[in-house]
Amino acid sequence: MALRLSDYDFKAKDHDGYGENWPISYADLSPYYDKVDLYLGISGHPEGLPQMPDGKYQRPIKLTSSELHLRETLKGMDRMLTPYRAGVTTDGLKHNKYRSRCYGRGACDRHVGGCDIHAAFDSPTGLIRPAMDTGNLTLRPNSTVYEVTVDKDTGKATGVSFLDSETRKSYQAKAKTVLLAASTLESARLMLLSKSTLYPNGIGNSSGHVGHNFCEHVMGPSVAGLMKELVGKPRTLDDGRPGGFYIPRFRNVNTKQSDFLRGYGFEGGAGCGMIPGSAFTSPGFGEEYKRHVRDYAGATIEIGGFGEVLPRYENAVDIDPEVKDTWGVPVLRFSYKFGENEMKMAQDMAVTGREMFEAAGFEVLSSSDKVLPEGWSIHELGTSRMGDDPKTSVLNQYEQSHDVKNLFVVDGSAFVNASCQNPTWTIMALCWRSCDYLADQLKKGEI
Amino acid sequence: MDPILNRRDLFKAFTAVAFTTLQLPAAEPGAPLFFTRDEFALLDALTDLMIPTDDHSPGAHDAGVAAFIDRRVAEAFLAQDKDSWRKGLSAMNELSQSSCQCPFLKASQQQQQEMLKKLAAKEKDPKTEPEKFFTQLKETTAFAYYSSSIGIHQEINYKGNVLLEQFVGYDAT
């Protein structure tokens, strides 16, 4: 899922007064989203939504008949169903010899490590191999970094200490600039572990905000429905595609909810798949069950919500005083819980999900407002948020540490809020922008 | 899989049915890897009761569902994933003992159907050991059967996994 955030996210405080604005706006990041789109390839359909800006799309994936029907229904409800915006190249990329265009085989999940022709973006073929081909990248595998080292006199980062995970020997790498991109949690862990006399709370942590404001997406509520017209119909080829559809956020955009802030989107899909979803929803057993599965295969449609978890200072990770990992490096400890806003939002997901299915004339087979546990989304964000004020933020708008000028954190850590949309494309656009800035600063001798 | 099950985030709910590619220990040809022969016979019969042969296609026995489950349980990382099957099968025999005074496989076809019907009636909210096992067995049998050659081609008549000459996008304008 490759989505752009908008000023409903970057300037969320201006809309509802909660939290902080990002120190950038959509206009700052938009050219970098374009670069990511064109470099990695993205499929989607432009819809002109202010809360989810369009990108530079290759061919969109095909919607199935029930998905099209729901799209038409939602037009009358001021909501939108758009083909899944996927980080998948559907037309091919002439500049990348490691990746093929999507042939629509429907084999997305059949290979360990994902798409075997790399039509779906992955870092090894999308970024790392092309970078190695420049001759400017040295990759040292099996290296577990446990500390960012510091020059006592200048206060600058000097490199990192790491263990060879096979020999368990310790090494140091020296560097002019250190960029952490270990993922939101591991980068926070590294910074908190990198304590010195200069930085007693961990490197880059004079604000005390490293590890705080941890946020992600709340998931769980879902609805499964049936398009009765499709029951008993012959199979069609519907799953030769990397995803189904997305229903972008519609809460707190043009209207205001009284009981919760921010919003959520739905991912969903319908149509015939190799393993019919009806196998898991049909009642009973035996011949009757088998016939039911067969008749209902391809006739079901399902959606599941992804909602914004508000950033809160008290939602935090810190270093566990006792537990260590297999390398003897202390692990993170979590103090993280959903709040009332997330729970109310989740209830609303189940209600609006049903409402949309009923409006489309789908028979609701099941619906759930059960919330999945914290952390389920694996969209961890926010532990070193960016901002203009070094007292309340860890990084500046270029993901550069306020405290240590040659330290950058270029993963999801810099997010000021989680939005309700998948973060990968934003992480990469931010990183690209930060690297342009870094190159410029190095050229000017500022770092 | 249906698109919604395809999603990594949601698919985690089904990690209990994930494949592994471990090397299997050498065993006498045809012998179950994890289950005893008696357990395997019961499992095979139960899966075929779940998805029997009908006038449309062969059922779970012919699709090799029990062998699939046996391999998967043999490869399971967690002891509880193995124990639940052994306990479940013996719970089915205990249920049969108490209601038919014989092991499940010795019960008449009608008695077997009756027992399963009672368990199926509770499938939305299973409480007892056999009720829980019924849902586990059903879900796993379904996953195995509908991903088998018989399930994919003969039963469901799946149209996917073919090269598209042209991948035509949807024009929403």
Image (tube, grey):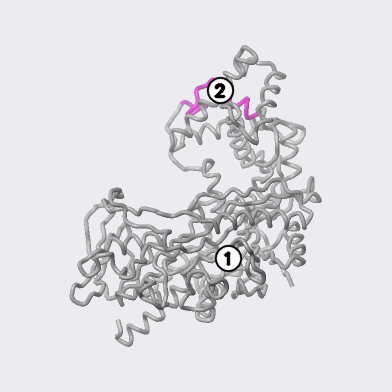
User: Which amino acid does the dot numbered 1 rest on?
Assistant: Arg
| Chain bearing mark 1 | A
Q: Residue at x 72, y 19 (%)?
A: B110
Indicate yes or no whether the magenta region holds residue A325: no
Tell me residue A159's x, y (percent): 26, 69
Indicate yes or no whether the magenta region holds residue B44: yes
Tell me residue A195's x, y (percent): 25, 64
2 and 1 marks on the same chain: no
Quarter of the rendering occupied by the C terminus of chain B: bottom right
> Mark on residue A377?
none
Residue extending furthest toward the bottom: A444
Which residue range is magenta in the image?
A: B28-48
Q: Is residue B84 above or below residue A121?
A: above
> Mark on residue B91?
2
Q: Is residue A421 above or below residue A230?
A: below
Q: Give the left or right position of residue A364, taking residue B62 as reference.
A: right
Q: Residue at x 26, y 56 (%)?
A: A164
| Label 1 secondary element | loop
Residue, disc 1: A262
Q: Using a 10 Å C-alpha cutoff, classify the residue at mark 1 as few (fewer than 14 neighbours), some (14 to 19) or many (20 or more).
A: many
Say which of A198 and A327 sits in front: A198
Q: Residue at x 56, y 27 (%)?
A: B129
Residue extending furthest toward the top: B101
Cα–Cα span, label 2 and label 1: 49 Å
User: Which amino acid does the dot numbered 2 rest on?
Assistant: Ala
Q: Residue at x 24, y 65 (%)?
A: A200
| Label 2 secondary element | helix
Tell me residue A99's x, y (percent): 52, 65
Q: Give the left or right position of residue A149, taking residue A314 as reference.
A: left
Residue A110 visible in the current orientation: yes
Q: Using a 10 Å C-alpha cutoff, classify the residue at mark 2 as few (fewer than 14 neighbours), some (14 to 19) or many (20 or more).
A: some
